[in-house]
Amino acid sequence: MSRMDLADLWGQGQAAFVAALGGLFEHSPWVVARAYGAGPFADGEALIAAAAAVLAAASGAEQLALIRAHPELAGRAAIAGDLTQASTSEQKSAGLDRLTPAEYARFHALNDAYRARFGFPFILCVRMHDKASILAALETRLAGDEDAEIAAALTEITRIARLRLSDLLAPGLSGARA
């Protein structure tokens, strides 16, 4: 896969920018589309900051739609092979594709309890965790309140987007111009 130059991508216009980067936020290209208005971006971190501002300004319904667009960790979509390429890779990086039957059962039980309690899936930037720390975080956050969980999910979604963007941008071609 060829890596992108953020400044060159910016120069192609909003439609191309969103087409290339809309997948940073799971099934939610509207985040990048709205963030585009804050550009051009000096680097990838500036884009992520603009996207985080978009999320903070989004309505509660929009925030929940974004959260609900994410798959459950080690969930049924993963087993069925119905995840986006990025989500599949991220879950594999944490070992969620190599769970024992007992671990799958534990994930499913916790995922079901979390969704029943909050009405959306548990979100965690799994590339920064392993399966044990994911389970521990899921168990801990299951005891939280809804507002705290929405805030935590949006923070984790921003972390996921930051790592996805880093994967896409060419080293040294983050958008900054001499």
Image (cartoon, grey):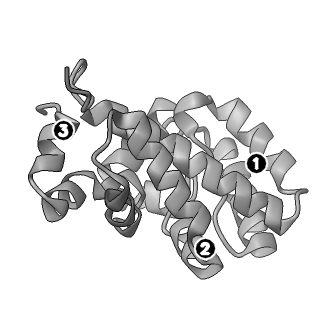
At 46% from the left and 51% from the top, the residue drawn is 50
Quadrant of the rendering where the N terminus is positioned = top left
Please tell me which of labels 2 and 1 falls first in the chain.
2
> Splitting the image into 4 quarters, where does residue 25 fall?
bottom left
Q: Nearer the viewer, residue 142 or 61?
A: 61
- Label 1 and label 3: CA atoms lie apart by 38 Å
Vertical placement of 6 versus 87: above or below?
above
At 72% from the left and 32% from the top, the residue drawn is 133
Q: Disc 3 marks which residue?
A: 7
At 17% from the left and 31% from the top, the residue drawn is 3
> Splitting the image into 4 quarters, where does residue 64 fall?
bottom right
Residue 81: x and y in percent read 36, 57
Amino acid, disc 1: Leu
Amino acid, disc 2: Leu
At 72% from the left and 57% from the top, the residue drawn is 151
- Label 3 and label 2: CA atoms lie apart by 31 Å
- Label 2 and label 1: CA atoms lie apart by 18 Å
Callout 3: few (<14), some (14-19), or many (20+) C-alpha neighbours within 10 Å?
many
The disc label shown at residue 138, or none: 1
Residue 18: x and y in percent read 24, 60
Q: Nearer the viewer, mark 3 or mark 2?
A: 3
Q: Disc 2 marks which residue?
A: 64
Q: Nearer the viewer, mark 1 or mark 3?
A: 3
Tag 1, which secondary structure? helix
